[in-house]
């Protein structure tokens, strides 16, 4: 596919955003807290196991993780976070899914709606755009971690469904329920991945022009800067020359 797809763009932007350690830790702690509601034993709770692994890979101190788990074991309700998904459209008919963990539905809904409105988008009802995406587990490694054949064989042996390798790196995809097992198997062989998460992969992409792309990138920046937002997925496609221009201007 020509140009830069949103799928890779979001991975790149999220990686840059996640260098802000305090914000990253906030998101990881919330994910652990919500996952722990289903049980504080990682071996019996795949979501919790995945959240703890992500926190370790981000070099979060063990004390931080233990503190969240102890609070969950005590049944504390001080931080009663819940999962919320928002769906809508950005300029150019681009479909977007925003996943959040919040302790205040009204605040988060208001902020997300305002972000869409300010940047020419509109929020829709739940499931208004998610049918255009597939829910998958995704793991990424730098290109120098392994040659394409070695990564492909190891990933399939671990239970992955597909591997896409390029000069930018390796992107491994799997069924959502298999994410923890695949990540653990690959980590044993290649070390910790750059990124491992559940995400929404667009079934098709929508081409956008330079003006639309610039507005969409601004919308993404606002959403990713919101502490309640955990992830953003969309189905846009930006031509290489436009992406280079926007990156240079950033």
Image: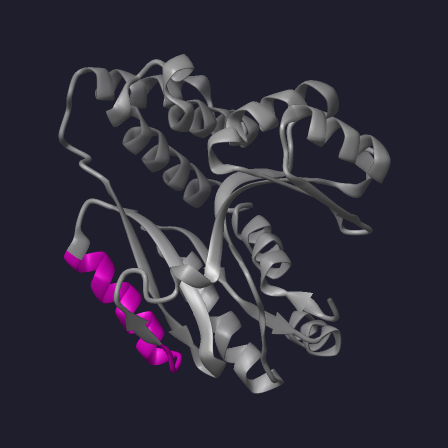
Above or below: residue 210 compared with residue 178: below
Q: Report the residue at 17% width, 50% height from top.
A: 104
Magenta stretch: includes residue 118? yes
Q: Is residue 154 above or below residue 225?
A: above
Asked whether residue 3 appears in the rendered view, the answer is yes
Indicate the quadrant containing the C terminus: top left, top right, bottom left or bottom right: bottom right
Q: Up-down: is 242 above or below 202?
A: below
Tell me if residue 62 is in the magenta stretch: no
Residue 147 visible (yes or no)? no
Q: Residue at x 41, y 36 (%)?
A: 28
**Residue 141 locus on image (x, y percent):** 70, 38
Where residue 232 sits, quadrant-wise, is: bottom left
Q: Quick check: 20 left or right of 2? A: left
Q: Nearer the viewer, residue 19 or 145?
A: 145
x and y percentages locating residue 74 in the rendered image: 17, 16
Provide the residue span drawn in magenta: 106-121
Q: Nearer the viewer, residue 150 or 15?
A: 150
- Magenta span: predominant SS is helix
Q: Position of residue 234 (x, y in %)?
A: 49, 64
Q: Residue at x 46, y 79 (%)?
A: 93
Q: Position of residue 114 (x, y in %)?
A: 28, 72
Judging from the image, the colouring scheme is one colour
Which residue does the image show at 73% across and 66% down from the upper left? 1
Q: Quadrant of residue 40?
A: top left
Tally of marks: 0
């Amino acid at each position: 596919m020509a140009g830069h797809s949103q799928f890779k763009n979001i991975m790149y932007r999220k990686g840059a955003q996640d260098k802000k350690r305090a914000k990253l830790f906030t998101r990881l702690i919330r994910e652990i807290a919500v996952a722990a509601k289903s049980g504080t034993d990682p071996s019996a709770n795949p979501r919790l196991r995945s959240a703890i692994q992500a926190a370790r890979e981000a070099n979060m101190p063990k004390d931080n993780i233990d503190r969240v788990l102890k609070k969950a074991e005590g049944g504390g309700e001080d931080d009663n976070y819940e999962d919320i998904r928002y769906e809508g459209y950005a300029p150019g008919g681009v479909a977007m899914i925003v996943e959040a963990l919040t302790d205040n539905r009204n605040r988060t809904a208001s902020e997300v709606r305002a972000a869409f409105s300010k940047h020419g988008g509109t929020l829709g009802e739940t499931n208004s755009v998610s049918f255009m995406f597939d829910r998958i587990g995704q793991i990424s490694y730098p290109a120098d971690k392994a040659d394409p054949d070695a990564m492909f064989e190891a990933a399939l042996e671990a239970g992955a469904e597909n591997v896409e390798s390029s000069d930018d790196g390796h992107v491994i995809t799997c069924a959502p329920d298999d994410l923890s097992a695949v990540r653990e198997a690959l980590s044993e062989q290649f070390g910790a991945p750059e990124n491992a998460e559940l995400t929404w992969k667009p079934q098709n992409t929508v081409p956008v022009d330079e003006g639309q792309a610039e507005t969409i990138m601004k919308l993404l920046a606002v959403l990713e800067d919101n502490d309640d937002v955990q992830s953003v997925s969309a189905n846009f496609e930006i031509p290489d020359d436009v992406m280079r221009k926007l990156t240079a201007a950033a």
